[in-house]
Image: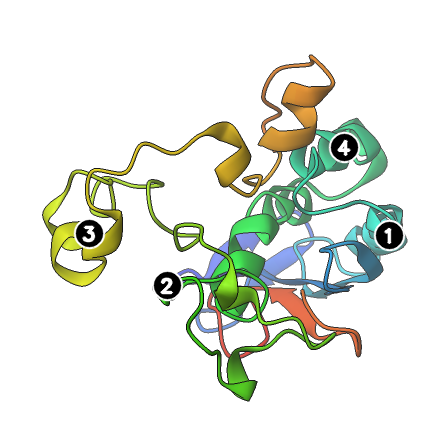
Amino acid sequence: MTDEKPRDVALASGVRPNGQPIHELWLRITIDRKLNVVDAEASSDWVPYPGLCQASNPAYRALIGLNLLHNFRRDAARLLAGTAGCTHLTELCAILPTAAIQAFAGDVWDTGDKAAGESASSENESADGTAERLNDKPPFQLGRCQALRFDGEAVQKFYPRWYGYAPRPADRPASPDNGAARQEGRGNAPGMLDGSGNEVQSNSQTEGNHA
């Protein structure tokens, strides 16, 4: 996250000249194929209180062991509540599940429309050799937004096999934070990806394996 003002800004710690960020913060996590956080790191390159704001960076190691799909936002908010962390870095946690899904859709989740029984190419096989496209289930992204609703024009045009489909709960992979929360009866929580540990990085944009 980068915060710049188009003018000189008088801070308690001194004047921050036009062109120099008030904040430049990074939150980086490394996850496995099951979306477990195996490493986490925070960095505060520009802050309004130099040498002081950075003291909260180690707190984000607490994200290690959480799962992006199972109550991640709730657990991150609990672990980093109050004065434990930086307000802005903690807010970045909320986008990590979505960033991971967008960065790796097709690698971990099936986003294609190959019918059961059709052969899958090697590039569409998962790391353990399982051809995920052989599952006769709708592509992961369908039924999750207005454009890709099962009775919509986009599904009718691009995924005709699934037009009018009425999914059962068992047919749908868990969305971020929802699956485990419902199973545990706790309600919805206000809230990457391979064996080698690709890195998900939260900043102002998603690029490649970084988010």
Identity, as a three-letter code, of the amino acid under mark 3: Val
In this view, the residue in front, 18 or 157, is: 157
Residue 183 drawn above or below residue 148: above
Marks 1 and 2 in Cβ contact (< 8 Å): no
* SS type, badge 1: loop
Q: Earlier in the sequence, mark 2 or mark 4?
A: 4
Q: Position of residue 9 (x, y in %)?
A: 49, 56
* SS type, badge 4: helix
Label 1: few (<14), some or many (≥20) within 10 Å? some
Give the Cα distance between marks 1 and 2: 38 Å
Farthest residue toward the bottom?
Answer: 122
Q: Which residue is mark 1?
A: 64
Q: Which residue is mark 3?
A: 155
Q: Which residue is mark 4?
A: 75
For the point 54% across and 33% down, which residue is it?
170
Here the colouring is: rainbow
Q: Earlier in the sequence, mark 1 or mark 4?
A: 1
